[in-house]
Image: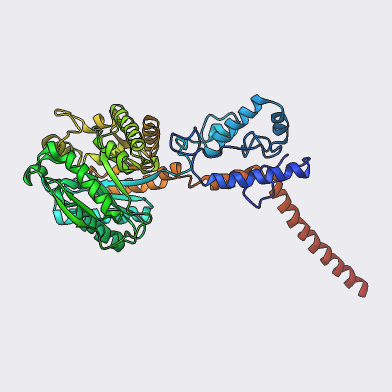
Amino acid sequence: MPRRPGPAGGAIAAPGLPASRTANVRNASLRLAADAGRGPASRPAAPGHASLDSTPRCPATGSAAAACRIAAADARGCRREAGCPAWQRRLAQAFRACHAGRAGGPWPHHATKPSRGPAMGEHPLKFGIFLAPFHPLHENPTLCLERDFDLVCHLDKLGYDEAWIGEHHSGGFEIIANPELFLAAAAERTKHIRLGTGVVSVPYHNPFTLASRMLQLDHQTRGRVMLGIGPGALAHDAFKIGVDPADQRRMLDEGAGAIIRLLRGERVTLKTDWFDLRDAFLQLRPYSRPGLEMAVASARSPVGALLAGKYGLGILSIGGTSDEALKFHSANWATAEEAAREHGQRVERDKWRMVTLMHVAETRERALENVRFGIAHFAEYFRDVATFPIIPAGTENPAEYLTKEGLAVIGTPADAIRHIERLWAGTGGFGCLMELVHNWADWQATQKSYELVARFVLPRFQGSNAMRQFSYDHARDNRTVHVAAAHQAIQAEIDKRQRLLAERKAKGQAAE
């Protein structure tokens, strides 16, 4: 039985193959081991993402086929592949399915593989949260804020990549007025997670002082902060400080332009109807290299996408995840790419963040039971106060509506995986999946939800277990050979000992 290719350094020679072909097997094994750490690759990479392996080769023949770790190493399979285009295509399909661990591959062992999700290109999908936050009116606000800090710390330990914190000043639910203050405290309590303003309402701030504060945070956190910007989401906030909603998006564009120039180290003289900069420049350079990362909020309007393209910023898509919303997100991404070309900039999909709603438990029934704790308060707030209602008035079962419309996952980790796959398919790909923190469940169930996502969802989209699966499959497929050799070695030692004892006994008898 041929031995299949394994990780670098493994014994991979197939009986009956010449030395040159054995070397090809070894080289293909090295390529496969390197590629396996890049994340899943079950379908062609989306626009903006590089293909996982543009020139895979048959490990035994070295021809431009595919390095399926199971099929392509089979000596008979490789000989058939050498002169058969159809076999090349079949091997290529096998490699893609085998590498991603997806069901439906052409080889029997693929039928038992669970789906690992969509092709994510060479960059693993990141995960984070979007923390407005939403706290019901009957809870202690001091403890609500403390729980928000605890959540960010919890996510830091679980390996989440990012946490974005909002700015709001009215309505009673969204009680963080200054995300920079929150980020400064959160940075002291965490070690790894990146922290962003999600988002700062630019029309409410002088661009010079906002840029100065963010550079200070950049240094305090050793480069862990990101600047998310937007026009301001709550109409009540704008009214209270005298900002006309008709001017907010213009003010965002003007303020963002000034902030970006300041962060780049330019000296800015610019006067508008709401700020006046006179030879303004910052006294610090960014700690982050090449500079402070920035992203702009984008819902249904193209304003955020146009701004992202104009300045080469990331995008925070916060307009929902229904099928209709995904069409808007895709259109806005195309708008951003077009604007980037017009302004000599570049937008990258790995800087595109998609916000969705999720609550996960061990079963769907338990997840639905968990969200009864607070989903009614969430629905009431968006119906009575928020600028854009998520749940229509009169909806008797918010959980059913949200899941049916594709706006939320309330279910199991498997449901979450399918939901993310749908978002990927509907947009063509993005860089970070962000869960909107909704407080539908109590604290214990909320912690458990994020833990389940970290344990069972993140690995599917980050390639965390690719080499573990490779190692398992290799050990399983070679078990008979390896175990037989081990048994032979053990038996040889036993036989050796028995012979030694027999010789000693014979010598003793001879001496008598």
Colour setup of the view: rainbow
Q: Residue at left 38%, top 38%? A: 430
Q: In the rendered view of the protein, which quadrant contains the C terminus?
A: bottom right
Q: Residue at left 47%, top 38%? A: 116
Q: Residue 14 in the image: x percent, y percent? A: 73, 42
Q: Nearer the viewer, residue 247 or 186?
A: 247
Q: Is residue 134 left or right of residue 355?
A: left
* Residue 182 in view of the camera: no
Q: Is residue 94 left or right of residue 218?
A: right
Q: Quadrant of residue 240?
A: top left
Q: Is residue 476 left or right of residue 61?
A: left
Q: Residue at left 40%, top 32%? A: 428
Name the outermost residue toward the bottom: 511
* Residue 90 in view of the camera: yes
Q: Residue 338 in the image: x percent, y percent? A: 34, 33
Q: How many marks?
A: 0
Q: In the rendered view of the protein, which quadrant contains the N terminus?
A: top right
Image height of 262 relative to 113, above or below: below
Q: Residue 353 in the image: x percent, y percent? A: 33, 41
Q: Quadrant of residue 325?
A: top left
Q: Residue 277 in the image: x percent, y percent? A: 17, 53
